[in-house]
Image (cartoon, grey):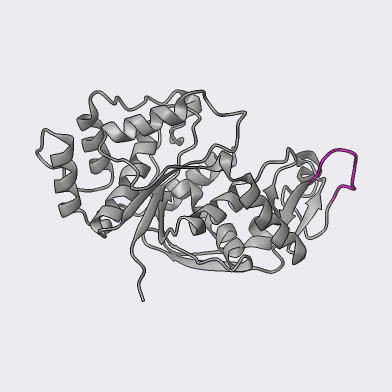
């Protein structure tokens, strides 16, 4: 039985909504609306050191001005630490996760990938928690990028799921939240393509459903770098949303309706939406995205 479509957009409140984020939001929104499904917004605000005051509210207001509001209550990750802690405890009880005191410098000495055994010994400082990947090799079919495969031991190593500062790491939080929100398809930027095998492994270990995935091409600057809030990428102007929406539709390979109102433009865009018009990211673009996400 096919479940009703549920998609999501999950920005981090580290600045205002820029064009690259708009492409991700619109791409996920169009997939959901074309499937007559629900579209949810989740604010991924676990990294409080990088959070910009008022950014979450500004992002939500800008999305509303662009005609895209969450169909359900917006979920804030900062309010869900107990839920993530319960998932960590379950993994630890199954010996799938362990405490780790290895620093980046420690791992740099062994090639940057955490091996099956820790490099550093326990110290007085708080540890992180890592997931044991063992010999896991994960393959999945992405709706845009095609078949993807990754050997986690060779390419990733045991990875952090709980940070040393006591905060849940992205990989675990997103898996728990996608399941809690009943997400059936994750549509996001290709910079997160390499994270997908880690998330699928976590889903399997926690007995959670695996959604379908579609990774959109990334918006790059003139130097071939991912647009970033930290590099002052031009924010979307909420008071004049039509130019940004038209540009985002064009970037996604979709027809650009001749409409003068946001509601009309989006309604026509949904009727004309075809996922197969979205360009498959090139290997060079995927490599650029991989480098951007590693920085």
Measured from the top left, where is residue 48 in percent x and y?
60, 31
Is 95 part of what is drawn in magenta? Answer: no
Residue at the (37%, 62%) spot, across then down: 143
Q: Would you say 216 lies left or right of 54 here?
A: left
What range of the chain is rendered magenta?
119-127
Looking at the rendering, in which quadrant would you find the C terminus? top right
The reply to whether residue 281 is in sight is no
Nearer-the-camera pick, 177 or 134: 177
* 229 lies above or below 212: above
The furthest residue to the bottom: 1
Looking at the rendering, in which quadrant would you find the N terminus? bottom left
Nearer-the-camera pick, 185 or 159: 185
Residue 212 position by quadrant:
bottom left
* 22 lies above or below 2: above
Residue at the (33%, 65%) spot, across then down: 4
Residue at the (50%, 29%) spot, across then down: 14
Q: Main secondary structure of the magenta part?
A: loop
């Amino acid at each position: 039985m096919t479940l009703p479509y549920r998609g999501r957009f999950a920005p981090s409140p580290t600045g205002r909504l820029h064009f690259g984020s708009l492409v991700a939001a619109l791409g996920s929104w169009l997939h959901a609306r074309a499937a007559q499904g629900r579209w949810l917004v989740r604010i991924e605000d676990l990294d409080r050191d990088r959070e910009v005051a008022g950014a979450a509210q500004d992002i939500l207001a800008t999305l509303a001005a662009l005609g895209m509001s969450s169909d359900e209550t917006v979920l804030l990750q900062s309010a869900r630490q107990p839920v993530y802690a319960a998932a960590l405890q379950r993994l630890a009880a199954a010996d799938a996760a362990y405490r780790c005191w290895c620093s980046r410098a420690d791992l740099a000495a062994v090639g940057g990938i955490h091996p099956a055994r820790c490099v550093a010994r326990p110290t007085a400082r708080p540890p992180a928690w890592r997931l044991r990947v063992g010999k896991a090799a994960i393959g999945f079919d992405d709706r845009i990028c095609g078949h993807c495969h990754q050997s986690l031991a060779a390419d990733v190593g045991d990875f952090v799921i709980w940070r040393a500062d006591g905060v849940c790491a992205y990989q675990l939080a997103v898996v728990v939240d996608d399941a809690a929100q009943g997400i059936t398809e994750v549509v996001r930027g290709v910079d997160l393509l390499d994270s997908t095998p880690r998330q699928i492994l976590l889903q399997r270990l926690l007995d959670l459903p695996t959604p379908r995935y579609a990774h959109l091409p990334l918006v790059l600057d003139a130097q071939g770098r991912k647009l970033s809030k930290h590099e002052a990428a031009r924010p979307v102007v909420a008071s004049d949303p039509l130019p940004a929406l038209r540009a985002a539709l064009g970037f996604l390979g979709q027809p650009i309706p001749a409409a003068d109102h946001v509601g009309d433009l989006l309604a026509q865009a949904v009727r004309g939406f075809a996922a197969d018009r979205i360009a498959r990211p090139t290997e060079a673009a995927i490599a650029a995205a991989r480098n951007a996400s590693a920085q």
